[in-house]
Each structure stands twice: as C-alpha cells, then as structure tokens.
Amino acid sequence: MATLSDIGVAAVINILTAFAFFIAFAILRLQPVNDRVYFPKWYLKGLRSSPIKTGGLASKFVNLDFRSYIKFLNWMPQALRMPEPELIDHAGLDSVVYLRIYLLGLKIFFPIACLAFTVMVPVNWTNTTLDKLQNLTFSDIDKLSISNIPNGSSRFWVHLCMAYVISFWTCFVLKREYKIIGSMRLQFLASDQRRPDQFTVLVRNIPPDPDESVSELVEHFFKVNHPDYYLTYQVTTLILLRMIHLDSCFWFDSCFLSTKQAVYNANKLSELVQKRKKCQNWLDYYQNKHSRNPSKRPMIKVGFLGCWGEEVDAIDRYTEKIEGLTRKISEEKEKVTSSTKSLVPAAFVSFKRRWGAVVCAQTQQSRNPTEWLTEWAPEPRDIYWDNLALPYVHLTIRRLVIAVAFFFLTFFFMIPIAFVQTLANIEGIEKAVPFLKPLIEMKAIKSFIQGFLPGIALKIFLIVLPSILMFMSKFEGFISKSSLERRCASRYYMFQFINVFLCSIIAGTALQQLNSFLNQSATEIPKTIGVSIPMKATFFITYIMVDGWAGVAGEILRLKPLVIYHLKNFFLVKTEKDREEAMDPGTIGFNTGEPQIQLYFILGLVYAAVSPILLPFILVFFALAYVVYRHQIINVYNQEYESAGAFWPDVHRRIVIALIVSQLLLMGLLSTKHASRSTPLLFILPVLTIGFHRFCKGRYEPVFVRYPLQDAMVKDTLERTKEPNLNLKTFLQNAYVHPVFKAADNVKDEMVVEEPRADQTPDLVATKRSSKRHTSGSSFETF
Amino acid sequence: MATLSDIGVAAVINILTAFAFFIAFAILRLQPVNDRVYFPKWYLKGLRSSPIKTGGLASKFVNLDFRSYIKFLNWMPQALRMPEPELIDHAGLDSVVYLRIYLLGLKIFFPIACLAFTVMVPVNWTNTTLDKLQNLTFSDIDKLSISNIPNGSSRFWVHLCMAYVISFWTCFVLKREYKIIGSMRLQFLASDQRRPDQFTVLVRNIPPDPDESVSELVEHFFKVNHPDYYLTYQVTTLILLRMIHLDSCFWFDSCFLSTKQAVYNANKLSELVQKRKKCQNWLDYYQNKHSRNPSKRPMIKVGFLGCWGEEVDAIDRYTEKIEGLTRKISEEKEKVTSSTKSLVPAAFVSFKRRWGAVVCAQTQQSRNPTEWLTEWAPEPRDIYWDNLALPYVHLTIRRLVIAVAFFFLTFFFMIPIAFVQTLANIEGIEKAVPFLKPLIEMKAIKSFIQGFLPGIALKIFLIVLPSILMFMSKFEGFISKSSLERRCASRYYMFQFINVFLCSIIAGTALQQLNSFLNQSATEIPKTIGVSIPMKATFFITYIMVDGWAGVAGEILRLKPLVIYHLKNFFLVKTEKDREEAMDPGTIGFNTGEPQIQLYFILGLVYAAVSPILLPFILVFFALAYVVYRHQIINVYNQEYESAGAFWPDVHRRIVIALIVSQLLLMGLLSTKHASRSTPLLFILPVLTIGFHRFCKGRYEPVFVRYPLQDAMVKDTLERTKEPNLNLKTFLQNAYVHPVFKAADNVKDEMVVEEPRADQTPDLVATKRSSKRHTSGSSFETF
C-alpha cells in the first residue's frame, strides 16, 4: 500500500517530468524552424509569416538569442494575459467556453478542497479504527479517508453535512456558470457580424414529386407558406442552394441507385479537382524556380516519372494541363448539377430577414411531421454533407442500431480483444511466419514480445476508439460536425465512466460488472461500488498524475506534429503552399477532451466527501490544463467550426450526473458503515439535484437550442437602419455550396481563412422605449 | 380453485345481471319523466324539448305505449347507426377518438384471440404436467395455461413465436390507428369553422415592468416582434384580452399580496353575480305564475324567509333588486379591471391571421426562455383560469413537490388507511360516543359495523382518489382542463398499474412490493412477477366480469343522476331554468375512464401468450363498452371541451408500455420454466418495441402538439377568398373573457350552448398547382 510519502515521491517525479516537458517545449518553441509547429494558428490567420526569410542561415533554423532562453516559463503569463473578449475574437466562443470548463473545475473544487482539509481531514484523522485492525495493512492515505471512522460512529453526520455542502455549492456554481455562458452565447450571436447561417434554414426530407424537381418544389412550397419573408417582389431574389450527396460510403445507402449514381459523379469531379490542385502546385514550384533564375526556363521530361522522353518547357506544360483540367471540371460539374438523380431531397433556404429564418426553423411546416423538416442551418464550414439526404425512417433505424451497437461495444469489447490476445502469442507468430522463428527465439526479443503483445490489441483498440465512436455518430445521421463531436463526447464519456471509473473501482471487466449488476438489487449496487471507493484513492491519485499531469504537459510539446512536420518539410515540401499544408494545427478535440475532464469531475465529486486527499491533485490538473490549453488555443489549434458554445448543456448535464452518482455512492458507502440513520437524509439530495437539473434545463437550455425572435428582430432592425441598400442575395449566393464545387470554381480558395471580425459593437438605433429595454439592453442583466 | 364450469356459471350470472340492467334501462328511458336523465345531450343542444307539455296527465310521467317496450334492446343498433362524421359533428372529435380506444381493443385482441385459441390452447391442453402433480389442486383453467407445459419443454418456442406475433400485430394496429387519428385530427382542424383559439396565443410569464402595465407591455412587445401579423394599420385592431387571476385557493399563492387582492375582488364580484342569478330565477318564477293567471299579481312578504312583514308585488321587487345588483356588478367589475394589482402577467394575444398565431405559438420570443412563454391558446371553455399566473420557478418546484407526493401516495397510501382502520373499530367508536354503546352492542349492528368498517376507509379513499389526483394536477399548474384530465389519467394509470395489477399478481401492498423490488436484482423482478401470472388468471377473469361488464352495464342505467334529478325536480325546481340545471349530463370522464381501459389492455397483452382463456372476456368487455359508451356519448354526456383528440399520444404510449411489460414478464416467466434458451430471442422484442415507439413519437406525435404552417396558410387563404371583408376584431372581442365577467355582462348567457357547425365543406380556391397538391388535397392520403 502506498503511504503518504510514496505518493509525495510520485508527485515530485511527475512534477519534474512535467517541468522537463516544459523546458523542452520552451527550447523547441524558440527555434524558428519549429515556428509552424508551435504557432500555426497565427499562420492560419495570416498574422505571421515564415521567420526563415529574414536573418542568416544559422538563425533561420536555430534561435541564437540566448536571453530568450532564460525566461523559459514566460509563455504561461503570456497565455493568461489575453483578455476573454479578445480571445473570443481570436479563437471563437467555442474555445473560450471550453476553457471555462477547466475554470469551472477550479471554482467548484477549490472551496470544497479548503473546506475538506479544514473539516474532514481532522475528523477522519483523529480516529483509530485502522490502527486497531492489526492484521490489516493500511497507509496514511487511508487514515485520511472515511475508512478510518468506526462503524456506526456519529462522526458520519459530518460527512452527511459535507455531502449537502458539496451538492449545494456545485449546483450554485453550475447555475451561475450556465447563466453566464448562456448570456455569452446570446451576446456573441447578437454582436456577431452578418453570416449566411443567420438567414438560412436547412430543409430536409423534401417529399418526392413526380412532376417537379426538388428545386421547383422548394421554391413553390416556401413561396406559398412563407410569402412575406421568403419572397421578395422579384422572383430572382430567391436564394436556393442545392447540394449533392457525395461520398456516401455506407453499405446502408448502397441499395439506392440514385445515391450510387451521385457518388460516382462526384467522385470523378473530386478526382479532377485533386489532379488540378497537384498541377497547380507543380506550376507554382516551377514558376518560383524561374523567378529565382529568370535566365533559364525550367524543363521537364514527359515520360514515365519525368525520367526520360522529350524535354518540354515545364511552366507551359502545366499551364496547359491546368487549362485542360479546368475545362473538364466545368463539364463534369455541369453534368453533376444538371442530373436530377444526383439531387438530394434537402435544401438550404434563405430568407430576406433573420426573423423569417427563425420562424421557419422553429415551426412545423407540413402536416406530415417527417417531411419538410426545417432546422437552423449550421455554419457552412460546420456542415457534414454526407448525411443530408437520409430519410426519416432510416434515421430511426440507424439510431436504434447504433444504440444496440454501442451497448455491445461498451460491455463486450473485451471479448474480441481477448481473442486477438490469445492468437497473438509467440507460438502463433511462429506458426504464421516460420522463417522468423530463429529471430523470435532470441531471449531478449522473446521476452519483449511476450511483455508487449498482450497489451497491444487493447492499446490499439483504445487509440482507435474515438474514430469508432465518430463513425457511429456519422452513421446515426447528424448533419453538423459540432453535433457529431457532441454525440461522440457523450458516448466516450459513457464508455469511460463504465470502463475506467467503474472498472477501476470494482476490479473486473465491464461485462462481469453488467452481469453482477443485473443480478444485484437496486439497493445493493451503490453499496458494492461505494464500499470499494476509499480503497481506490491511491490508484486514482496515480492515474491523475500520469494521465492528467503528464498528459497535459505532453500536449504542449506536440511531439507527433513536430516530427511529422519536419519529415514532411524535408521530403515533400516544394512550395510555400505545401509547407502550409504540412502544418497540422489540430483542434481542441472536444470529443475526447471533454470526457476526460468529466472523468476528473466525477472523481473529485465522489472523493470529496470520502478521501479529500484526492482534491489537490485534481486542482493541480485543472490549473495546469487551463494554462496549457489556453496557450494552445491562442497559438496552435485551428477552429474548425463555431457552434457558439452549443455543447454547454452536455457539459452541465454530465456534471450533474456525476453529482448524483457521488450522492448515490456515498449513500451506499454510509449504509455499509452502519450509518443507515443518515441515508434517508442523503436520499433527499438526488431528488433535489434532479429538480435542479430540470429547472436548469427549462431555464437555460433553450438558449442553446433556439434563437429568440426578439434578438432576430433587433438585428434585422439594426441592419436595415445601417445598410438600407444591402443586397442580401449576392451575399448568400455561394455560401452553402459543397466544398467540391467551391474547389472546382476557385483554384486558390482551398484554405479556410477566417474572416476578420468587425470590432466595433453595433450601435443601437432609437426604437420604442419598451423594445429597447426588453430586447437588447437590460436583458443581458436580467437573464 | 375455480374450474371452467365455475367460471362459466359466474359468466352467466354476470351476463344475466347485465341484461337485468339493460331491461331496467329500457323501461326507465321510455318514461317521459326520465327524459332529461337519459337524453340530456339533446336538451343541451336545444334539439329536444320537455315531453311533459304534450298529452294527458298520466302520459306526462309514464309511457303507456306498450309497443315501445317490446324492442327493449333497440337502443343498441340505434347507438351504432350514427355514422362517424355525424358523430363528430354531434359530440366532438374527442368523443369519437375516445370510442376508437374500445375499437382498438377489439382490433388488437380479436385476431389474437382467434390465433391463441387455434394454436395456444391445443399446445397447452395436450400436456399432462399438472395431471402428474398429484398433490397439487388445479383447475381446467390452469390446464389451458402455460403452467401445464413441463419445464424445459420445446413447446415454449410456440409461446415465443406467439409473443412475436402479438407484438408485431399490436404495433401494426397501433401504427395504423395513430396515422388514422392523426389525419382525423388534421381534417377536423382543417374543416373546422373559424374559432377564436385559431388566432390566439396564450402568453405567460410576462416580466414585470415598473413603468408599464401588463397590457401596454404586451402591446409594445408584439407590435415590435410580430409587426406584420400582430398589427394592422390601425392600432385599434389590436386585440388584447386581459384576464384576472381569480379564485386561486392554494396556500402556495397566498404569500403574494397581489394575488390575494385579486382573489378578494373577484370573490365579491362572483358573489354578486350569483345573487343576481338567484333573483332572476325568482323573477322568472313569478312572471310564469303571473302569465298563467294574469288577473292576480303575485305578492311576497319582505320579512325573514318570506314569512312575515309587508306584502309587496313580487315582480316589481325582483326587477328592482336585479337592477340594483346589475349596477353594483358593473361598479365592482370596473374596480377589478382597473386595479393593476388584479392583473396577472399573462395575456391572450390574437393575430390577424392563423399563420401569425402558429408562428408565435411555436417560437421562442424572448432571450430569457422563461419569460414571454407562448403557447397555443386552448379553447375558451377549456381554459383552467386559476393557473394562468404561475411564474416559472413555481412551476418547477410544484412539479417536483407533486412528483414526490405522488410517489408517496402510490406506495404509502395504505399507511394512513390502516391507521384509520385501527381507530375505526367498535371499541374506538364506543369510546368516542359512549351514549351509542347500547345501540352498537346489539348483535346485528355490531357484526355489520365489524364487517363494514375496515373496508370503508379504503373505499372512501378510492372514491376520492380521482379528486386527489385532479387536485395534484391543478397544483402542478396546467392551464387547460384537457391537459389536467390527461395528467390525471397518467397518474391514475400508474396508481392502478401498481396497486391493482401488480398488487393482485404478487399478493402484498405496494409498499411491500417496493421494498422487495429494491432488494431484488433487475433480472429477478420479472421472474417474481412472471411466475405468478398464470395463477391469477381466474382472479382477473372475475375482476373483468364484475368491474368491467357490470360496471359498463351500470353506467348506462345512470342510477345516481336519476335519483338526484328526481330529488331536485321534486324539491328545488321552480322554473324551466332550474330544471335544466337539475340535469347532470356528466362527461366522458377521460381521467378515470381511460386508465380503466388501459388496465384491460395490459391484462389482455400479458395473458395473451400465457392464459388465452382471458381474452374472450376482454373482448366482451370492449364490445359491450363500445356500444354503451357510444349510446351515452350520443344521448347523455355533455362535451366540456374539444381538444381534437390531443390525448391519443398518451393512449398510444400506455399501450406500448403494456406491450413492453408483457414482453418482460413473459421473459421472466419463461426463464423460470428452464426455457432460458429462448430469453435472448425475447430480449430483442422490447428493444424493437422501444424503437417502434420512438419512431411513432417522431412521426405522429407532432401532429398532436403543433399546428403546421401549411395548414394555417391554407385556411387563411380560403378565408380571405371567401370573406374578404371579415372583421376579425369584433369576432375575437370577447372570446377570452373570464367566465365571471361574461356572467356579469349577460344575465341570460349562463348555459354553454354549442354553436351550430357549418355543414358545407370549404371549397378550395384555385391556387398554384404545387400548393394545392401539397397542402390540402394529397396530404391526407400521403400522411
């Protein structure tokens, strides 16, 4: 058993490791050659250019200014310095809200830790229960926990009160945070510049019609049912953007000929676009070469791999090739768009005003509630194009299939892995590849394989798991990347809760647990889990240090992107464009990052009243992660989409679930401690927490789901006052075009460059007093 | 144990009882004196007048035409003869949809019964398991059930297949029915005449404003946020109807001074209105008297109870009194409406077109999602006025409180009743009222009390239960009578499921069950219940006959209203108006009737695969109840509100729950029968059923919750074409006025008389082809 000093030593080692990472990071980030690895965000925003262009040869690659090495930790204050509004401008609201999850952890656990160390630790420590048990080995850690209190002691009332304090404090902080983030979201949406998705509604499941094409159908339907907002007086103002269902690769869809056809068509188009891109890159390369040495035109051979054959002028050849491809692309594009088969029953419908779009998105259009489904269109870059064409019945079946599949994945994933493990032993390999036998039989290699192989299947599975979950979510038919990531996060959290949290507490696989839970009564389950909680404190402390601390410190070093970038840079990069593509800024990774944080929330809440010694470790994790991720968000991560913090209801819900789990487990633990008098009092807590959750759900969640008419009206009014002659039609013209078409249209426009945001806050026009009061000004405060 | 012949005798007895009821009914209904008891619906509709006025004295009270007694059952074909569309016109869609629940029972169980009797009965009967068990008493009923099959027999595969067949058939019928009723609802709403609630939205939780009154606030808010539909060009077209929160009698509200004030004010008003009504009645009485004998003016004494004092002219005196009261009422009304304290933050907002109302009802108005809550306004007569003023936080707390209260009511209701039972024994009564001791000590009375008392507390509780549940629902804050009844039905169903169904199967109170369920594992619970199912078949057969058959036959006799009407008629009735008020047509009673039907559904589904002998009894119940209730709906029940079948999703959900329960119980039963090989196959069924439910919920439920824009647009267009000069403002003027004010305004207008419906179907105007195709015509078919 680990004693306090053991844990102390482990903590020191982990802190030193983290420091080593930080020093390595501090050195690497100052080298100009790594600039694109550690500051890609600035390159993407166009605010930083390659430092290679300036200075001498050595200083191109190595930073020789030794003074900059001294302050090796100064990135930390730098990361903290950027104020929140600027950060929202710089990296989007999603990132800021994501960072607030870490802050929320600090806000919840810092007061709880202080209280626990002043109240709980003395209460637990001053008992002698464990000292009396001579035949049991125990550590100082256990003396700090609830295990040290004798059965039936009246000291359990302290734990009971503590559970109440923890629950009320957590709910209070959660409610305040929900409110703040809700108003941040509304403020963000209100102060946001004009964006196509504000005017646009996604219409799905348009019923087929034998006489009319989808586009005619949409036009007629909305002309009739939204006459005032959909139609201007000229019919030409109609903005109707059709999209093509492209690389739908699931077996599920392959039974429909029309879909197959579309896949074929668009594949050819996308192939041509890729080809042209490559040629364009070569053209750039030779043009660069030519501009550096204008006297000599670069020549290439036309034969296989450019090794033999006739020599021709490279620039001319590639220009020619590109022209030919562009012609082919436009032909192909024409073919795809004109073919009715490739049209899917979905459309983006835009309105003259935001008010009209809000109304259309929130109402039911047709009397058949599975047709003409409208919803707020995601941002153009947030759309997951492949799922737009799924009919309603498929969605229901797919969800059911995935629910069952996820159940099996969670509880039965060990079965195939165990099977692979039995196959992948020394004898198996020797049988499969007999000529390796002498090599394998070498002692060192043999022991390595024997130690390594059993774990590798599990390791590979865990690495692949997020991709499996993402595939599941895609199969389910979500239509935006943000909702895909949210669903993945939910699933990943459930997986981690069952396979990490529960399986660590009650030793055993998920399947064994499922079996025992099915055969245990409802009152027995919390007892079974609760009773093992205090014993696992040391394990989770180590887990936090290794997975949390070291993981976060490793995140800032970005070893994998660093290596890959330099490899690419060395072997593949020809032009500046190639170098830009070699950068891998990555994203926040909500689908894996948030469930990890949630694991720490549940650990903190469960252990707060049981073994408060865990709390400081969690606090260190939250603080460290906050600083590191703030730095990464500012300097590294690329923003793939902006959902304006739409994931917060999920975060909130999971913390509430963690709170309820902690209450139930404490109830189970206390009832095994013969403190059953206190359990009825504990039973009130989950009921109140559920009530709190329902209240929050009704009070704050709609802000994240629907857009209020009032706000739309205010923005419309402002816009009409400021820009009375705005031509919305041209603005919306090409907003919702499938990326392949965009690429087909424009050679240069492949990189998603964030549009600069309007900095000034919109002025308020003088409207009626009541409307001003209740729409823009005071509602921030009263929210 | 009851044998088949025992059951047969019981059935014959019950059938004879039912026939006796029918004969009694046939005789009673033909007497003119009972006409208002058995045909009140026609009186309410104004289509029948008192038969007393014609014929001789005897024929006023007794029907002397003996030929009419011969065909004593001819009300049955009469009841079935009225076609469905006419019935919708006559009694509303709610009644017709309610009747379809019985039809649904027949549709589900008739084919199942046929199949079960051809397949299951031979399979069960041809075993000898029970014959072999010499020491066990068993009946023929048990030989027909699954108990007769030896453990581990492969015949259980038949039961498994049967479970699949039952599930698929039930789902198929349910889906078809949901579709039919959905389109009936839409057709009803579409063909319906113009009604105020089509244009009106209920706005609740209007935030307080220090500067503006609620009415100004509402006007400003909707002028700004719904400019095109809320406002006409004249401000006067604004339709804004305020209501007063009146007789809010809960302790919960009494902490608010403003509410109290309103209660006080309106109480006075309503008192005055009552007084005037009484005077009016007396005036009518004396006027009648005078008209029969014009030579003599009726005189009354002004003293106490009209026994002494000065004699005055009665007609003059009451006319005077009424005038005085009318003056007072209008003063009081002025006072109430002008006092800002009595205004609640809720309003009915009307729109120029249905489209505007649909949009407003379905969208979020304000950025604070708990303010400016809009929802489709219920019919004026459907509104439950007392709950309109509840703020959002209260609603959350109230729901939580009621959820906890209902939990305790369901599981702990036996505790107070047992307590009362211990008190209410002979000794207790003797102690409380010693002077009754000699009387009580008499043998006959003593044994009667001893036999009667223990049951009386429970009986009273069960009679009062629907009122308790209704009180709970009212406390929860629902705003329409229809939603109150729906919620009551849900609660009543849960209560019955636990305290009738489960408690009958596993002998024991709900509390004992709860305890054993908490201490049993998830796999154990279905086994415990499942294993006792076959044994309880005879009990439930008796239950169906006594509660179902006799209950339905008793319903048609209407003994209670009959007695009360004649008592009132004899002692209280002075004028024709009094006689009208002495009628008690009653209503369908969805809140108690539907849960009772659901109990039969669950019995049928659970026993279909276990003891099919139960099915014929259920079929007889459904058939009998269908005829009886159809008759009652045509001739008796008054329609209190019209929700256009809004309760169907509840009915559907409960049948699906019954189906899942039956599947789980069969799984439990089979696993105790050593047929565990079949349980994995059975496990698929609940998963599929849940999938089916989710599909139906998404596909059909929105029809019952939201009103599609398309339909609103069609109705608007039709109306504008047919009545271009319609003045909607006058139409909506007084639609949503609190009944007290209505009564205050108009002396004569106390009876709710249904407006005659427009018979011709609305013509279609020639619109664009696509709109015609997809809005009115084909959507009925494609739905």
Image (cartoon, coloured by chain):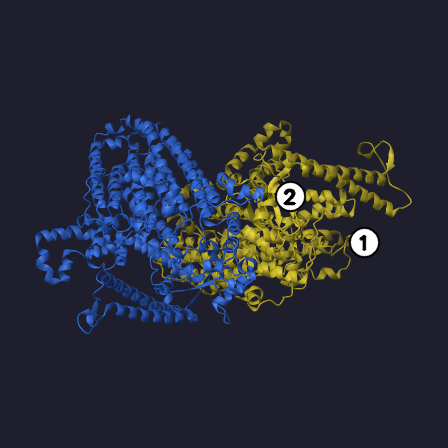
Chain colours: A yellow, B blue
Image coordinates for residue B232, horizontal then vertical, percent: 54, 60
* Outermost residue toward the front in this view: B295
* Outermost residue toward the bottom in this view: B310
Instruction: Determine the chain carrying the residue at label 2.
Output: A
Image coordinates for residue B543, horizontal then vertical, percent: 25, 41
Q: Nearer the viewer, mark 1 or mark 2?
A: 2
Q: Which residue is mark 1?
A: A53
Residue type at the position of mark 2 = Arg
Q: How far apart are labels 1 and 2 at the CA level?
A: 44 Å
> Both on one chain, marks 1 and 2?
yes
Residue type at the position of mark 1 = Lys
Label count reads 2
Q: Which residue is mark 2?
A: A242
Instruction: Determine the chain carrying the residue at label 1.
Output: A
Q: Secondary structure at mark 2?
A: strand
Upstream in the sequence, badge 1 or badge 2? 1
Vertical position of residue A722 compared to residue A343: above or below: below
